[in-house]
């Protein structure tokens, strides 16, 4: 990357804390100023939790996850929504998780935050749909990222077991998530709002006992 390209890239970067209303509002205003307007918001800022029995979890850990994953999504939607409503156009894509679709023991903070994102998506879609603003959600399952590699290598996740439990028999890839988000951001999904798209290879659809291959 040459120096001019680097400078242009830096001009499009803004930094902030999504759980802060002040930062969320400033980030949106700076982005509108630099780019002349916003057509799409992808709410993908989030933090994971650590598996632990509920009675041993710290309230501070719960609050941090709720603040970033749920309140952060709300604040960014609120800030961008005001701009999109004025333009009567826009697409917001929130990132939830399969942990927000079903009960995952010992993950109550993360699961609650991601379930909240799904409901927030539905509420905003109903409130803003008549003004031309669409709000949808993607709920990924296990995706092959550096974070997943870390927990696999540490022995905290059994990838073979996950693949046996997944109807498509494999882990998702990051570019596949991006394609799902791009679809919801595009005019190809112009009559879709309030939807949550499970990106999980069929994980949330499977209701059998044991592995898919033996069900």
Image (cartoon, rainbow, N blue to C red):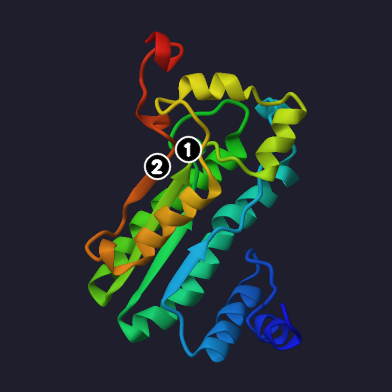
Q: Mark number for residue 198? A: 2
| Observer able to see residue 52 | yes
- Quadrant for the C terminus, please: top left
Relative height, residue 4 to residue 167 (above, below): below
Q: Position of residue 49 (x, y in %)?
A: 68, 40
N-term-proximal mark, 2 vs 1: 1
69 horizontally vs 152: left or right: left
Towards the viewer: 32 or 53: 32
- CA separation in Å, label 2 and label 1: 7 Å
Disc number for residue 98: 1
Residue 124 visible to the viewer: no
Which residue is outermost to the front? 2
**Position of the N terminus by quadrant:** bottom right
Categorize mark 2 by other alpha carbons within 10 Å: few (<14), some (14-19), many (20+).
many
Q: Quadrant of residue 151?
A: top right
**Residue occupying the point 50% across, 76% down:** 79
Residue under the image location 46 percent in, 49 percent down: 176
Residue 152, compared with residue 124, is above or below; it is above
Side of 191 where 107 appears, left or right: right
Name the one closer to the observer, 10 or 2.
2
- Residue 45, image x, y percentages: 61, 58
Element marked by disc 1: helix
Please determine whether, in this image, residue 103 is positioned above or below residue 63.
above
**Label placed on residue 145:** none
């Amino acid at each position: 990357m040459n120096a001019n390209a680097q400078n242009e890239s830096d001009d499009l970067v803004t930094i902030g804390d999504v759980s802060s209303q002040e930062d969320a509002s400033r980030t949106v205003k700076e982005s509108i100023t630099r780019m002349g307007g916003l057509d799409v918001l992808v709410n993908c800022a989030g933090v994971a939790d650590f598996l632990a029995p509920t009675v041993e979890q710290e309230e501070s850990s719960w609050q941090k996850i709720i603040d970033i994953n749920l309140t952060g999504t709300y604040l960014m939607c609120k800030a961008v929504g005001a701009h999109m409503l004025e333009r009567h156009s826009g697409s917001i894509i929130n990132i939830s998780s399969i942990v927000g679709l079903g009960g995952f023991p010992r993950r109550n903070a993360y699961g609650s935050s991601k379930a909240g994102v799904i409901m927030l998506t539905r509420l905003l879609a109903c409130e803003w749909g008549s003004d031309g603003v669409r709000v949808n959600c993607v709920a990924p399952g296990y995706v092959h990222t550096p974070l997943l590699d870390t927990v696999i290598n540490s022995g905290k996740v059994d990838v073979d077991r996950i693949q046996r439990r997944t109807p498509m028999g494999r882990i998702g890839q990051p570019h596949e998530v991006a394609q799902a988000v791009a679809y919801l951001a595009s005019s190809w999904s112009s009559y879709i709002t309030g939807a949550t798209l499970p990106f999980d290879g069929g994980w949330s659809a499977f209701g059998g006992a044991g592995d898919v291959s033996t069900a």
